[in-house]
Image (spheres, helix red, strand yellow):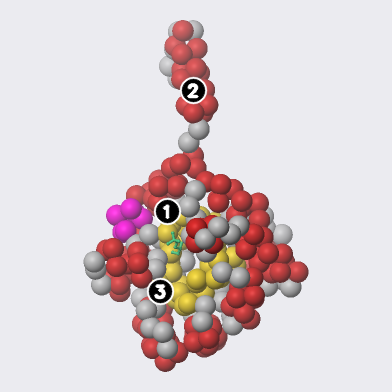
Amino acid sequence: MVALKNLLTACFSWKEYPMQFFADTADVAAIRQLHEDHRIDGVTTNPSLMAKTGRPIMDVIAEICDIVDGPVSAEVTAADYENMLRQGRLLADIAENVAVKLPLTKDGLKACAALSDFGIMVNVTLCFTPMQALMAARAGAHFVSPFVGRLDDIGQQGMDLIIDIADIFDAHQMETEILAASIRHQAHVLEAAKAGAHVVTIPPKLFDELLQHPLTDAGIDRFNKDWQEAGGQEF
Ligand code: G3P
């Protein structure tokens, strides 16, 4: 899909896609409903989210990849290079839309370079500084996941990280996509969009919350009332 988009962009100055919305969960039932309701662009999981399922990771990722065509992030649990490669290949073999998630460590970036050389999509995660993001991009990451909420949690301005990374990536025309993660609320989504993040990955509950406003509901009620008072013609 990314290749097609790039081709169309090159040939027809194709309108750039808007920021993509991924679901940050490993709950297969929730993903199925979200995809039906919101046509989600992808999914991110992590060992904590996967542990909540109580199911084998290979089964869960396979089921998610059957539901969503876009990138599905599946994270290794190994800390050393050799086992990251081994696990990464196992995960990538599940489906072509698997993005192997690797931590932002020396072994993680070595594994990122090796797997991306094999054409495997990599999402480098647990990013907390612009320089970490730049190192991930150098290593061939398809996505880098800066964690906004966890910086907020320690009293920092997590969104400044997205802004700084976007500035650096724009200045150097980096192809790596910024996948804003650890998103806690609507303001994070708004600020990530303004900062130029390519993707936000959000908790399931946020999808509905982003659509809702009391004035929208009140406006619909008013339209219906006026329509009915004028006779409520059917068509
Ligand atoms: O899955 C990666 C990231 O979105 C996790 O966020 O809420 O655990 O800080 P959180």
Task: Please rate how many residues cluster around mark 2, counting C-alpha atoms within 10 Å: few if below 14, some from 14 to 19, many from 20.
Answer: few
Q: Is residue 38 left or right of residue 2?
A: left
Seen at 46% across and 61% down, the residue is 42
**Residue 77 in the image: above or below residue 163:** below
Q: What is the C-alpha distance between the residues marked 1 and 3?
A: 17 Å
Task: Please rate how many residues cluster around mark 1, counting C-alpha atoms within 10 Å: few if below 14, some from 14 to 19, many from 20.
Answer: some
Amino acid at pointer 2: Ala
Tell me residue 218's x, y (percent).
Answer: 49, 22
Extreme residue toward the bottom, this view:
82
Q: Residue 218's mark?
A: 2
Tell me residue 210's x, y (percent).
Answer: 49, 42
Q: Quadrant of the C terminus?
A: top left
* Ligand 1 within 8 Å of the CB at mark 1: yes
Seen at 27% across and 63% down, the residue is 53
**Residue 190 in the image: above or below residue 222:** below
Q: What is the C-alpha distance between the residues marked 1 and 2?
A: 27 Å
Please say whether residue 47 is visible from this viewpoint. Answer: yes
Task: Give the extent of the magenta segment.
Answer: 27-32
Seen at 24% across and 66% down, the residue is 54
Q: Specify whether residue 220 is painted magenta.
A: no
Return the residue at label 1.
203
Earlier in the chain: of badge 3 and badge 2, it is 3
Extreme residue toward the right, this view:
171
Residue nearest the observer in this picture, 137 or 52: 52
Return the residue at label 3.
75
Amino acid at pointer 3: Glu
Give yes or no for contact between labels 3 and 2 (Cβ–Cβ under 8 Å): no
Secondary structure of the residue carrying numbered label 2: helix
**Residue 140 in the image: above or below residue 203:** below
